[in-house]
Amino acid sequence: MKTRTIRVQGKGSASQAPDRISLFFSVAHPRPQYDKAIEGCNSRVEAIRAAASELNLPGADLKTVQFGVSDETQYENGRYKHIGYTATHQLCMELPVDQTLVGKFLSSLVQRGAEPQVRINFTVADPEALKQRVLADAVANAKARAEVIATASGVKLGSIADIQYGYSEVVISSQPSEM
């Protein structure tokens, strides 16, 4: 007997309240001298580390994402003129969702003169569990679609003969939230 096939693609989603906050810091320090640009940038990063330490936040959780020094030029009279260097340090720290703690941390950064640009993302501590819920929802969605097609075709849906799981993008994102 020839196997009859219905091919469907499932789509899944799941939601969960965020339980982690990712703080991204960027400090830039322009100076005419290379070493002064780096020293200034490093002192601002140390201010971020000190603020974390003051609140007993694990310093090891503050990780460098990127570091660089760029040559700064200015266009004058048809030529580029060297005016200095800008040291840039980008860091990331992940914390539990605690608005009071994050507020104290950001206030401490201002008091210490760190002056970083700050970006806040919300995430979950166990993204794999959330991804598994999305996949389970996608399979249920595919099965429901197959049942609709089978009923409309006047046939009975039998057991699953084959599941093909290819690349699919599972994105964990958050909606902006006021803090």
Image: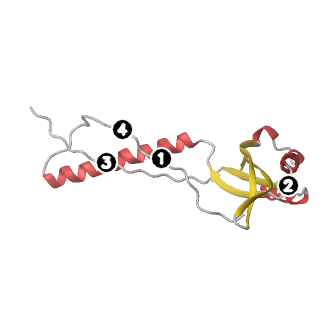
Q: Earlier in the sequence, mark 4 or mark 3?
A: 3
What numbered label is drawn on residue 165? 4
Please give the name of the residue rendered at 30% of the width and 50% of the height, measured from the top-left corner. Answer: 144
Q: Earlier in the sequence, mark 4 or mark 1?
A: 4
Quadrant position of residue 35: top right
Q: What label does residue 61 carry, if any?
A: none
Spatial CA distance of label 4 from label 2 is 56 Å
* Residues at marks 2 and 1, CA–CA distance in whole angstroms: 46 Å
Q: CA distance from mark 3 to mark 1?
A: 15 Å
Give the mark toward the camera: 4 or 2. 2
Give the percent coordinates (x, y) of residue 179: 72, 63
* Residue at point 18%, 41% (across, down): 5
Element type at mark 2:
loop
Label 3 neighbour load within 10 Å: few <14, some 14-19, many 20+: some
Q: Measured from the top left, where is residue 10 in percent x and y?
A: 34, 48
According to the picture, the residue beneath numbered tag 3 turns out to be: 9
Spatial separation of the CA atoms under disc 4 and disc 1: 13 Å
Frontmost of labels 3 and 2 is: 2
* Quadrant the N terminus occupies: top left
What is the distance, in whole Å, between disc 4 and disc 3 at their CAs? 10 Å
| Horizontal relation, residue 171 to residue 34: left or right | left
Hey, what amino acid is under mark 1? Answer: Val
Q: Earlier in the sequence, mark 4 or mark 2?
A: 2
Q: Secondary structure at mark 1?
A: loop
Of marks 2 and 1, the one in the foreground = 2
Taking depth in this image into account, of 76 and 34 the one nearest to the observer is 76
Instruction: Identify the secondary structure beneath mark 4.
Output: loop
Q: Where residue 4 appears, x then y in whole percent?
A: 15, 39
Front residue of 18/82: it is 82
Residue type of the residue flagged with mark 4: Tyr
> Residue pushed farthest top?
1
Circle 2: residue type? Pro
